[in-house]
Image (spheres, rainbow, N blue to C red):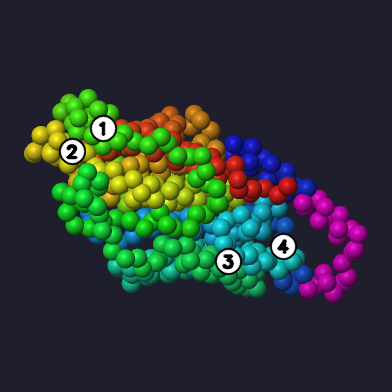
């Protein structure tokens, strides 16, 4: 799909250039206009489109985000904000460079509550990498203001300045350079302000967990409850969760042979026969240490972008599609978690099955079991990436090379999503049903979004 995307945009660029030349023939330039244009090199170079530039600046800003997110256990303050921030950055990037993509359109009027974006000046040149740099710098500087903020801001200033130092001589026109920076910043200001109204920053009352057999935060994490109100956040696309619900999980029962009993016993039985590769799979996707609440998918996205090295237009489109599908799936997932309040395997295995000293491979997360957040996010990620690269895209991820873990290779994005679901069961922190149905829900949400959003103009 990426190859055909490049070909179609190249054809559009040629047609646009041809008809622009025809307009020039219809109304010849006056001598004084020619002189002015010659003295302002690049000032009217508005035919240079987004697809003529690399995605270098966008890739570097995502790498910056990942450096900020990569933390040891228990020290990362961003949690579910990692995918949310990635998504809003993707929207800002897309909206800032889409004016240079003639056959594509803004998402204004399609995303819930999104304001109308600033317009470019007709006939004026824009350097789209500079626009992207300004937009992503603004977004990241406003998102990452928590712990270690001073160090983050210094790093982000350094990256923004380094890219501007690279781009300014390429443009060789101060007006175009400044106009590009101003436009990228103006778009980002709109997107960031809109992001503050989605509910993620709301101050909510403390969540009081119910009594067992419904979920409450138990050992090995007796303190802290994660994301109880995340499901109340504004959806990006209205109707995105329609028709995505799975049949309810088994009703709680302590009767031997009941569906719930069988579901829990399976987790225990698997834990007794784990192989070293299965343990390695479980640990690879534990997130801590690592990238919190789905941040590992951002790393996979970056690795594939670095391998493909697409032009800026394709990167922007990919970023916004993948980001929205993942963020939406997480909102839906956390809404279901705190509606159903299904308990984690650990208490049932200890108290009902009687294995009082049993523990999972690593600590049980501090939120309800159903559906699996990793699985639902993986389903959305897989569907969005498959829509871009096809069903049989082979890739290798190196997310945790820095922790000494071996790279993992897949022949499709769906294969990776299924592996992630298995990882949560191997770890002993999820039931199989939560992972299988969570992945299905993520896939359906992503497909709803991809079917609803119109990126191309009619």
Q: In this image, 65 relative to 9: left or right?
A: left
Residue 440 seen in render:
yes
Task: Tell me which segment is drawn in magenta.
Answer: 16-36
Q: Quadrant of the N terminus?
A: top right
Q: Position of residue 452 (x, y in %)?
A: 60, 45
- Name the residue at the left extreme: 357
Q: Secondary structure at mark 3?
A: helix
**Disc marking residue 348:** 2
Marks 2/1: CA distance? Answer: 10 Å
Residue 251 pos. (x, y %): 30, 36
Determine the CA span between mark 1 and mark 3: 50 Å
Image x and y of residue 298, in percent: 41, 49
Tell me, yes or no, whether the highlighted magenta stretch contains residue 416. no
Is 45 situated above or below 280?
below
Instruction: Say what secondary structure mark 2 lies in.
Output: helix
Q: Secondary structure at mark 4?
A: loop
Alpha carbons under labels 3 and 2: distance apart:
51 Å
Residue occupying the point 43% across, 69% down: 142
Left or right of residue 424: residue 176: right
**C-alpha gap between disc 3 and disc 4:** 21 Å
Which residue position is annotated with label 4? Answer: 45
Residue 20 painted magenta: yes
Provide the residue designation for mark 1. 260
Q: Is residue 442 left or right of residue 98?
A: left
Mark toward the viewer: 3 or 4? 3
**Disc 3 + disc 4, Cβ < 8 Å:** no
- Report the predominant secondary structure element of the magenta stretch: helix
Q: Which residue is mark 3?
A: 187
* Mark toward the start of the polypeptide (2 vs 1): 1
Earlier in the chain: of badge 1 and badge 4, it is 4
Mark 1 neighbour class, 10 Å CA radius: few under 14, some 14 to 19, many 20 or more? some
């Amino acid at each position: 799909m990426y190859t055909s995307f490049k070909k179609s945009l190249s054809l559009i660029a040629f047609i646009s250039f041809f008809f622009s030349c025809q307009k020039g023939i219809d109304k010849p330039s006056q001598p004084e206009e020619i002189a002015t244009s010659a003295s302002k090199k690049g000032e009217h170079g508005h035919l240079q489109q987004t697809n003529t530039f690399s995605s270098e600046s966008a890739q570097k800003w995502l790498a910056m985000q990942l450096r900020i997110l990569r933390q040891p256990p228990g020290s990362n303050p961003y949690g579910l904000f990692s995918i949310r921030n990635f998504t809003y950055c993707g929207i800002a990037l897309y909206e800032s460079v889409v004016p240079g993509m003639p056959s594509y359109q803004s998402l204004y009027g399609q995303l819930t509550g999104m304001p109308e974006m600033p317009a470019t000046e007709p006939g004026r040149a824009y350097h789209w990498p500079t626009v992207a740099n300004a937009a992503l710098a603004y977004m990241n500087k406003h998102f990452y203001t928590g712990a270690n903020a001073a160090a983050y801001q210094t790093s982000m200033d350094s990256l923004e300045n380094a890219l501007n130092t690279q781009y300014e001589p390429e443009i060789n026109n101060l007006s175009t350079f400044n106009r590009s920076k101003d436009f990228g910043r103006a778009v980002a200001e709109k997107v960031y302000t809109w992001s503050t109204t989605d509910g993620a920053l709301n101050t909510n009352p403390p969540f009081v967990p119910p009594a067992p057999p419904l979920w409450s935060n138990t050992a090995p994490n007796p303190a802290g409850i994660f994301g109880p109100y995340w499901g109340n956040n504004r959806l990006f696309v209205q109707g995105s969760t329609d028709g995505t619900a799975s049949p309810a999980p088994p009703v709680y029962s302590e009767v031997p042979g009941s569906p719930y009993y069988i579901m829990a016993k399976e987790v225990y039985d698997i834990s007794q026969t784990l192989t070293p590769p299965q343990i390695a799979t479980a640990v690879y996707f534990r997130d801590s240490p690592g990238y919190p609440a789905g941040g590992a998918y951002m790393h996979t996205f970056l690795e594939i972008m670095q391998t493909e090295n697409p032009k800026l237009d394709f990167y922007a489109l990919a970023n916004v599609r993948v980001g929205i599908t993942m963020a939406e799936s997480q909102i839906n997932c956390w809404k279901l978690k705190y509606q159903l309040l299904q308990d984690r395997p650990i208490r049932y295995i200890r108290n009902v099955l009687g294995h009082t000293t049993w523990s999972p491979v690593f600590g049980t997360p501090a939120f309800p079991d159903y559906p699996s957040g990793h699985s639902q996010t993986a389903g959305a990620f897989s569907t969005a990436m498959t829509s871009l690269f096809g069903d049989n895209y082979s890739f290798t991820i190196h997310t945790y090379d820095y922790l000494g873990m071996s790279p993992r290779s897949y022949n499709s994005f769906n294969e990776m999503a299924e592996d992630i679901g298995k990882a949560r069961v191997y770890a002993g922190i999820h039931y199989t049903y939560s992972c299988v149905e969570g992945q299905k829900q993520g896939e359906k949400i992503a497909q709803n979004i991809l079917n609803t959003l119109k990126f191309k103009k009619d």
